[in-house]
Image (cartoon, helix red, strand yellow):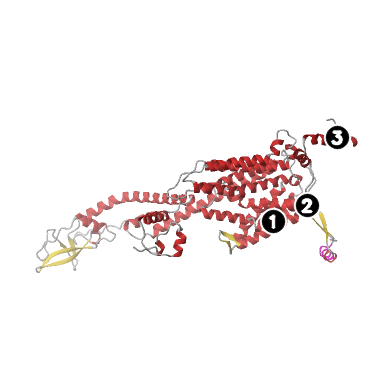
Amino acid sequence: MSRPVSQTSQPSWTSKTTFDALGVESGEETDEESVQESVLDQQSLEPPKPTKSALKKAKTLARIERRKQERAKARSAQVTPTLTDDLASSVDELPRQAHRPNGTVKHVSTETRTVNGQAPPPAPAEEELERASSSKPPSSEIVQSKANGHVQEESKPLEHELTPVPEEQPIPPPSAPVEEKKTPSQLSVQNVQNGHAYAPVVENKQMDLAQAEKSKKLQNALTRTVWTVIMIGGFLGLLAMGHVYMIILVMLCQTLVYREVTSLFSLKRKGDTGETPGRDPWSKTLNWYFFAVTNYFLYGESIIHYFKHVVFSDAQLAPFATNHRMISFALYTIGFVGFVMSLQRGYLKQQFGLFCWVHMTLLLIVVSSHFIVNNILEGMIWFWVPASLVICNDVFAYIWGITLGRTPLIKLSPKKTVEGFVGAFFSTVVFGIIWGTFFMRFDYMICPVRELGVSAFDTTVHCKPNPVFVWRDWNIPAPLSALLSTLLGRAITSIPYAPYQIHLFFMACFASLVAPFGGFFASGFKRAFNIKDFGHSIPGHGGMTDRMDCQFLMGVFTYVYYSNLIRETHVTVGSVLQTIVNGLTFHEQMELIADLKRYLEGQGIRVNV
């Protein structure tokens, strides 16, 4: 038995796609290969799992269709008995009369007549009922009479086509029935019962679907607007309350994003044997264990770096701060050993895939969140302004896209247009310079964190500002100065500026040209798993990942940009204390204290130790 090339059996050492691409005939196939092929065909014919939005839409359509069927059934139950009785009575009382050409009426006998000497078969009552109830009722009946020895056939009109009385006793024809006005849905049901066209049914169904879709869009828009206001208000409130609340917000966001992304791997997949294996009971526990260990390591590094003067001056916290990295590595090793011990036959492929998935998620989400927290600790402005730039670019891209958008930008996001992308770039640059210049005036926004208890309402927040926030004057060249002075009517010799405005320009360019690709990356993720949103954490907006996809990339860029081009390295009390605790022995520390006391007393300062 030979088979087409596309359905040939394949050796066990090749993949189905590669073997089919070669187009090789394998000749006769064994029973085992036939069974394997049938299993593969059944797997390939299984329909994909519908999404939640598709299920919801299907349920809505089914509900509408069910209601229409119930209404049609109720109407038919009311109309059918009356119609059947009328038809039966009309058949039983069919007048045995027929119109002659001269207008006279001939009474027809109801006896059994013969045609050419043979009696015609009796017509069952069911056939007459069926003929009378059809969409096109018969207009005449064959009437037989004997004339000149042969059968004469005459047409016998129905009751509503006759004047069934003699001339001397005329009976007026029945009055035409009054037609009731029917709704489109009633007309569609009647047309279906009579076998007529289905166009009204389809039209009504489309109208119902359009109305349901419109109401759904209005409800989604209202929900999205309400929750947008709630998120903006909550964000501004936490911003004013202090740095610690913003750190908690970032940790909450990263936890939700981590849960949404790791849950994608728990989607059901077919195993090697064609069966759907149950979920490994240890997988969820290990996922969150690695998440906790990674946060302990990263946030511990941040606390030790920014609060050295607190951590190393405390006798109980100093050992943890000194051995922080060793403790973190030991905790990770415990998780790694636990993962290896939990490996089970039948789950191996899923377990190793989940292990790689978790580590990729930790790298993209938790590490990025760590850099965002560092931006908050360096000064609230390094978190607030970059996040605002991303939001601004998203809003302006939407506005310019629906206004001038014609050219698609990328296939992963069909709604993104080149016009919206370019328009958002210029709008974000202008907005970023104005927005950042306004907030650089406040010490609460530009000062690095020294105490976590401060807030926007605390008037004691003061610091020496970073040089990028100090205003300077740019001396205009003489020819340009003369031209500007002539045009403006006053002397223009210099223009004030702050170096931070230049940095704002580059951050706005990144937020407009590069950060959107974080959103495109997330769109590709959703296409790969055939989902519309990552979750339902925020009503009307989808999951937290749908809102934070660009923020992670922008936060990492801001930290790298700030630490390499803007941050100033100074010797602080915390850095000196860290050197003393980590680099000097106990006797050396005591010697340092004695020398420092001697120096202070030489300066006229009395020290009691």
Q: Check disc 1: other Cα within 10 Å, few if <14, some if 14-19, many if 20+.
A: many
Name the residue type under label 3. Lys
Q: Which mark is residue 597?
A: 3
Binning the other alpha carbons within 10 Å of mark 3 as few (below 14), some (14 to 19) or many (20 upward) gives: some
Q: Position of residue 346 (x, y in %)?
A: 46, 46
Q: CA distance from mark 1 to mark 2?
A: 17 Å
Q: Secondary structure at mark 3?
A: helix
Real-space Cα separation, disc 3 to disc 2, in angstroms:
38 Å
State the residue in front, 6 or 77.
Answer: 6
**Mark before the other along the chain sequence, 3 or 1:** 1
**Image x and y of residue 267, in percent:** 49, 48
Q: CA distance from mark 3 to mark 1?
A: 51 Å
Number of numbered discs on residues: 3
Residue 243 vertical position relative to residue 486 in the rendered view, above or below? above
In this rendering, which labeled residue sits more in front, label 3 or label 1? Answer: 3
Q: Which residue is mark 2?
A: 468
Q: Residue at x 48, y 49 (%)?
A: 52
Residue bearing the label numbered 1: 508
